[in-house]
Image (cartoon, rainbow, N blue to C red):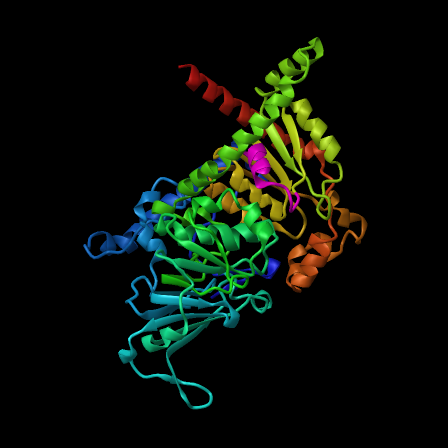
Amino acid sequence: MLKKMVQYQRYQQWKKGDELVVCLDEESVFENTNHTKRSRLKLLFLLLLSFISFSFFLAPHFFTSSSTFSLYSFGFEDEGLVSTSDVYASVCSSVSNGSICCDRSSIRSDICVMKGDVRTNSASSTITLYRNNDYGSQVFGASGENDDIFQHEKIKPYTRKWEKSVMDTIDELDLVLKGENNAIHQKCDVQHDVPAVFFSTGGYTGNLYHEFNDGILPLYITSQHFNKKVVFVILEYHDWWISKYENILPHLTEYPIIDFSGDNRTHCFPEAIVGLKIHDELTIDPSLMRGNGSIRDFRDMLDRAYLPRIRGLIQKEEPDRLALSPSAKTKIEMTEEKLDSKKPKVVIIARNDSRAILNEDSLVKMAQDIGFQVEVLWPQRTTELARIYRALNSSDVMIGVHGAAMTHFLFMRPESVFIQIVPLGTDWAADTYYGQPAVKLGLKYIGYKILPQESSLYNEYKKTDPVLTDPDSVNNRGWEFTKKIYLDRQNVRLNLRRFHKRLLRAYYYSVAKKNGRRHHQNQ
């Protein structure tokens, strides 16, 4: 039975019983209490009984050589057990020369592979593959005349195919297989000796979550086995998108990127992949990238992409600092800055529209009083990602209210602390899109679920209104209600006394981690 989640119009292909989810109350994060210990003993006892019963049931499988029973871990320990071929396994994993193969089995995206003499025609939004005329029966056009077309496929190369509203906005490509005699009518203007990957940067591009989830991560997965020997051809090309990811793209391809609609030349390739490969999971899920495409590889790639730019930013700032007169005041400021660098650093991701923290100034002061070095980030669409990467990659704790900007958790170092403030009506989305993936990324995740009194909606509705008491029932009414009420009209005023406990635990954890690292370096 497919479980549909109306929140955020996402499709989650879960079946009851597919996985055991152990939920920890937010109060129990980083805490051990007597009650918790007693609960754990009871839980361990129940698990032991279940395991013994389950073992008898599975005994025949353990003692047969053909058993396919295995334990799947979402951790990092057994990442190497899944090879790259498993990631790319599909009906089109092996395509013969001169043929088109389309895999439409995924709920997430279609992907087609064309192998042989591939040529583009942007004016007609067509990619043509030419092969021997003895391929088989032809397809006749509407007029009944023989068009010498052996195969005709249509595809929209975007990774949200289950969402009709957004797919209606994506440009469609015609993939055509013709006889080689027709090739004389379409001469090559540019001959490439490496494959091409065709994809769209339309749809939800402009939203950071979707840019990574529907673009960068699928592009990374699709292009990994080419070792940068691949040309990217983009439909609905945006200059700002190229500029935004200019640090990442050279680590995926070493060739100039082609604007499909803006380049009228005929480009010829030995192979074309149309669409992006991704797992059917609908969330940012780095744990799915294993083998040569593991999350560690992705993190290493991000480091390689941004560190040179970060070094450049630091070098650019140094002359400005040295230009200052070495006055007593400057020396004191430099000494204080050096001392601050030893403090754990917390970065607060601020919002200037809905879901803003109304008492943010008080939160900053509280964090400073605890002992944090505090930096407040205001990410804008035009903000250079390298600057955000620099701030978060050097931080110990990240705090933010649920929203697309939480995607920046990808820039944090493993074992850092990620505190996500969860407004009313966003529980499922906050956990699914950011909480669970953050844990898989190796972060220490704390989900701070606000109380109704901490929401600005508390002053707009009666205390017994379902908007406050039963958000799920409101979400079940449809996406438009979720968006209108919980996303567009809700701000947060934190109960600082309640939030203080989470922040204090994050501080002690960060200090212990820093001291442990410093002790290791001194040995």
Judge whether 271 appears above or below 46 on screen. Answer: below
How many numbered circles does the render carry? 0
Residue 138: quadrant of the picture: bottom left
| First to last magenta residue range | 380-396
Furthest residue toward bottom: 144
**Residue 33 visible to an observer of this rendering:** no
In the image, 140 versus 269, the foreground residue is: 269
At x 53%, y 27%, the residue is 509
Judge whether 310 appears above or below 274 on screen. Answer: above
At x 69%, y 10%, the residue is 327
Q: Is residue 285 left or right of residue 240?
A: left
In the image, 21 versus 95, the foreground residue is: 95
Whether the magenta-drawn stretch holds residue 382 is answered as: yes
At x 79%, y 53%, the residue is 461
**The C terminus, quarter of image:** top left
Residue 469 location (% of width, % of height): 70, 53
In the image, 396 versus 421, the foreground residue is: 396
Residue 290 location (% of width, % of height): 37, 47
Residue 349 location (% of width, % of height): 65, 39
**Residue 459 visible to an observer of this rendering:** yes
In the image, 375 versus 130, the foreground residue is: 130
Residue 278 location (% of width, % of height): 44, 57
Whether the magenta-drawn stretch holds residue 432 is answered as: no
Q: Is residue 218 left or right of residue 372?
A: left
Furthest residue toward top: 328
